Image (cartoon, rainbow, N blue to C red):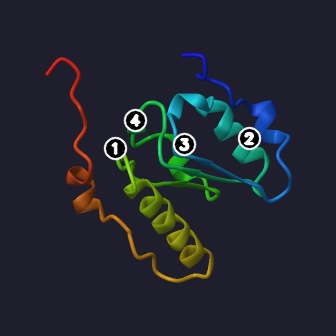
Amino acid sequence: ESTEGLIDEALLLSMKYGSTLMNTSRGSVIQQAELVQALRQRPDLTALLDVCFPEPPSPQDPLYSLNNCYLTPHLSGAIGAEREHLGDAMVEDAVRWKEGKAMSYCVSVDHQETAAPRLQVGA
């Protein structure tokens, strides 16, 4: 709870020109409505989001319509050495994307539903 809403519009707008925000922690760390506003005001900023709040975002979420926001599927969790491998894979694909190449670890829409099963509260 102590980290909820830490990143607000003022902080986002204070980022240097051309900065990228990458969130792989918890979606609630960022005030999402304020992120949308900041990205609209500052098209030079980019957001790479592995998590959102709520998760997953609704199909109508404005994040989907922003040219400077990229949503990636969350990989649940990892422990041990695989965390380093996951980080390497993310960096590798970020470089490939920047160079205009096809990404190696892209998840198709068909695969998205089974890539990381979600815990159903109360189930």
- Residue behind mark 3: 62
Tell me the residue at 56%/69% (across/down).
94
User: Mark on residue 55?
Assistant: 4
Label 3 element class: helix
Residue 113's x, y, as percent? 23, 51
Residue 46 to residue 29: above or below? below
Label 2 vs label 3: CA separation?
12 Å
Q: Nearer the viewer, mark 2 or mark 3?
A: 2
Label 4 element class: loop
User: Mark on residue 119?
Assistant: none
Dot 2 or dot 1: first in sequence order is 2
Pick the front one: 98 or 2: 2
Label 4 packing within 10 angstroms: few (<14), some (14-19), many (20+): few
Tell me the residue at 36%/44% (across/down).
77
User: Mark on residue 76?
Assistant: 1
- Residue behind mark 2: 38
Q: Nearer the viewer, mark 3 or mark 4?
A: 4
Task: Please say if the residues under marks 3 and 1 sit with CB atoms less than 8 Å apart.
Answer: no
Dot 4 or dot 2: first in sequence order is 2
Specify the amino acid type for callout 2: Ala
Specify the amino acid type for callout 1: Ser
Label 3 vs label 4: CA separation?
14 Å
Residue 62 to residue 33: above or below? below
Pick the front one: 54 or 117: 117
